[in-house]
Amino acid sequence: MTGKSHDVDVIVAGGGMVGAATACLLLRCGFAVAVVEARQPPRFDPEGEPGMRVSAISPGSARVLDQAGAWREIEKQRSCPYRRMHVEEAGHPDGLDFESVSFGLERLGTIVENDLVQSALWSVLENHPLVDVLCPATIQSFHEIKQGVEVALSDGRRLSARLLVAAEGATSPLRRQLGIRQDVWEYNQQGIVCAVTTDPPNLGVAWQRFLPGGPLAFLPLADGRSSMVWTRPADEAGPLLSLPDDPFLDVLSEAAEGGVGKPVAVGPRAGFPLAMRLSECYSSGRVALLGDAAHVVHPLAGQGVNLGLADAAALVETLLSARHAVAEGNVPELLAKWQRWRRSESQVMAGGTHAIRALFTPSALSGIRAFGLRQVGKSWLARDFFIRQAAGLGRNAPRMARGDSLKALLRLRA
């Protein structure tokens, strides 16, 4: 559908997981795409140590990545499906158990290293004839032109397209250039991450315990270890990160006692500050904000990258549903429609996570939290709604996430 007046149909700023997935989906629908990325990602080494940053890829997101052409490569290299999830309040180990078979699902999700997701998507990009990967490069400025947008790159080149996608992460320069305001909640917490070896090994359980100060989660890795995410107040995180391994294991063992196994070894640790960020709008003119450029949620529910992949799938669905409008240059109207859809969904997820975090932080509310978990456990409707949303299969999920193929969506162009 490339127009004569533009170099490509879509420019994607940012080649991370969300940006690369957006580009791959667009390419497979016949759009000509340019990807602008500042750093060449390293090739994933399946024999190397697991990366510290992992994502719980929902079944809906796995379908989106499959349509992007990357999921088979991801599963072939290193990933760990989980079919059981256990959530509990400290001191109340009964908690809640979710089994995939109870909800008619093959799995509840898949733990995958972020580096592997990006690497698999880049393999698709590098082998597609309709893409121009501009790396290393950044967008210095942009302005609207007739039925499109023109960007100036850091290497002096200029490029034009019908649509510009900003997927450069939470600090998005394009969002700042657009002057889009964000509501920001700083939690004064850090997430401590590392790989943990337990005895016995973790054979596929996603486990989470709510502790005073923040939740502790063990997510299963392909080799039987767990990827740990431990939310701690900022003034406690620094000392925990600086502890030698053995004293850290002692503290962790006490916090995780009775969980998926006794922690016996840990890998390198890192910490990152936690915040929630919601942009006042997700589009402006011919520019769309996707993923962390638009919204950042607390990692409590593990939904960050899943929200971004849903953004990408919904954008492609919206563009395909109105091919003639795109060709005629009516992109702002389409983006406004897409924005209403996605902002509503991300607000629900961000608001729900924000409320749960607030409820589960004060130790004084321990009894109330345990009671709430028991009540959810007794309600099939509540459990089903929770799992459907977490699995990316809610009623407002993009059609791709709910099982439609790109072939089916391409029929919308007829």
Image (cartoon, rainbow, N blue to C red):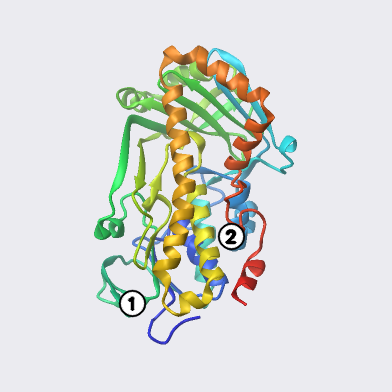
Measured as percent of width and height from the top left, residue 25 is found at 54, 65
Measured as percent of width and height from the top left, residue 308 is found at 47, 52
For image coordinates 70% across by 37% down, the residue present is: 100
Quadrant of the image for the C terminus? bottom right
Measured as percent of width and height from the top left, residue 227 is found at 52, 35
Which disc number belongs to residue 159? 1
For image coordinates 66% across by 60% down, the residue present is: 404
Which disc number belongs to residue 270? none
Q: Is residue 136 left or right of residue 400?
A: left
* Any part of residue 118 in sight: yes
Measured as percent of width and height from the top left, residue 224 is found at 62, 35
Q: Secondary structure at mark 1?
A: strand
Residue type at tag 2: Ala
Circle 2 Cα neighbour tier, 10 Å, few/some/many (<14 / 14–19 / ≥20)? many
Mark 2 — residue?
70
Task: Work out whether residue 124 or residue 42 is closer to the camera in this orientation and state it.
Answer: 124
Cα separation between marks 1 and 2: 27 Å
Task: Work out whether residue 15 or residue 163 is closer to the camera in this orientation and state it.
Answer: 163
